Image (cartoon, rainbow, N blue to C red):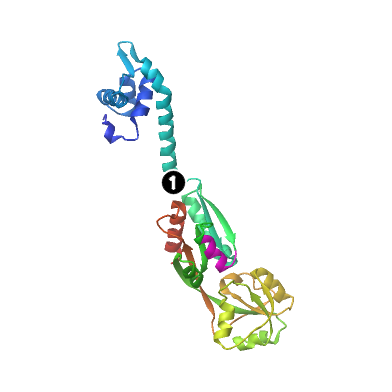
Amino acid sequence: MPQQPDAQARYSRYAIFIDVVKEGSFTKVANRIGYTQSAVSQTVKALERELGCTLVERSRDGVTLTKDGEQFMPYLQAVARDERALAEKQREVQGLGRATITIGTFTSVSRNLLPRPMLDFRRLYPSVRFNLRQSEYTSIAEWVRNGECDLGFTNLADAEAAGLESHSFGPDRMMAVVPPENPLAEKNELTLADLATQPFILLDEGRESVTLHAFEQAGLSPRVCYEVTDDYSILAMVRQGLGVTILYEMMLVGFESGVVVRPIREEPRRTITLGWRNSATLPLAARRFAEYLISELG
């Protein structure tokens, strides 16, 4: 059934006018876009009133441009092109087409937590790209605050210090990691006091070190001989017998070979937190992915 222009707003008066001139007929255009012939004619007349001149001549031979119409035509075509580009951009944003989501993260999250949600999200939105930037908590929180990342995985303290909106996931406890030949490997459970007696390889977590805070709370000072940012480098050092360490359980999954992993009685842990600067200004793709993560991971 033919419809009136307000029922099919996707056809602007400029696009309709250009089609009428191209076809040389109100009726052909009306039939193609589902308008009445009268509605198409009224649309062109409204454009003529808007511009204050007659744009087309109507005759038995069809519709042709007047001299004024010829002068206006390039401008009307430009407006119609811009309208199409705007509509395409709107569809792109709504469908998350070609969007890039930049996420600040650290090793255990990028290896264990993110792969499956990213894969599932790209099945929903195949054109979305992910850009992962790795660092420690404080830098990630600052990246998000400064707009360098859309989203950032950090700890709760750094997210709050940076003034981010955030959502915290479940705790990730820390485990003791020692060389197989170390006497501590004989114990089923270790204490921070046990670890404080050994050469210690410290995971550099930035301003908020869960490891150092745990030792401080226990009134202990570890014998830090090495401070390393990369978890996997620390594992290699432990395998070589350079010392003992404390690493996160999430990170250790699948990498226990050549080392002995033991629970720690005091159970130091971090709260993994996803932060973003402002919900109102967060790009649509990043907001959708954050919502997806929260719904999937709790």
Taking the magenta stretch, the answer to whether it contains residue 141 is yes
Secondary-structure class at tag 1: helix
Can the viewer see residue 23 in this picture?
no
- In the displayed structure, would residue 79 be above or below residue 203? above
Q: Position of residue 39 (x, y in %)?
A: 26, 26
Dividing the picture into quarters, in which one does residue 81 lie? Answer: top left
Can the viewer see residue 141 in this picture?
yes
Dividing the picture into quarters, in which one does residue 33 lie? Answer: top left
Q: Position of residue 180 (x, y in %)?
A: 70, 81
Tell me if mark 1 has few (under 14), some (14-19) or many (20+) residues whose alpha carbon lies within 10 angstroms of its own: some
Side of 17 relative to 245 (left or right) = left
Who's the residue at 42% across and 38% down the image? Answer: 86
Taking the magenta stretch, the answer to whether it contains residue 43 is no
Q: Position of residue 67 (x, y in %)?
A: 37, 15
Residue span colored magenta: 135-144
Q: Residue furthest front?
A: 52
Q: How many marks?
A: 1
- In the displayed structure, would residue 169 be above or below residue 79? below
Q: Main secondary structure of the magenta part?
A: helix
Asked whether 205 or 183 is in front, the reply is 205
> Mark 1 is on which residue type?
Val
Dividing the picture into quarters, in which one does residue 251 lie? Answer: bottom right
Who's the residue at 59% across and 80% down the image? Answer: 212
Residue position for label 1: 93
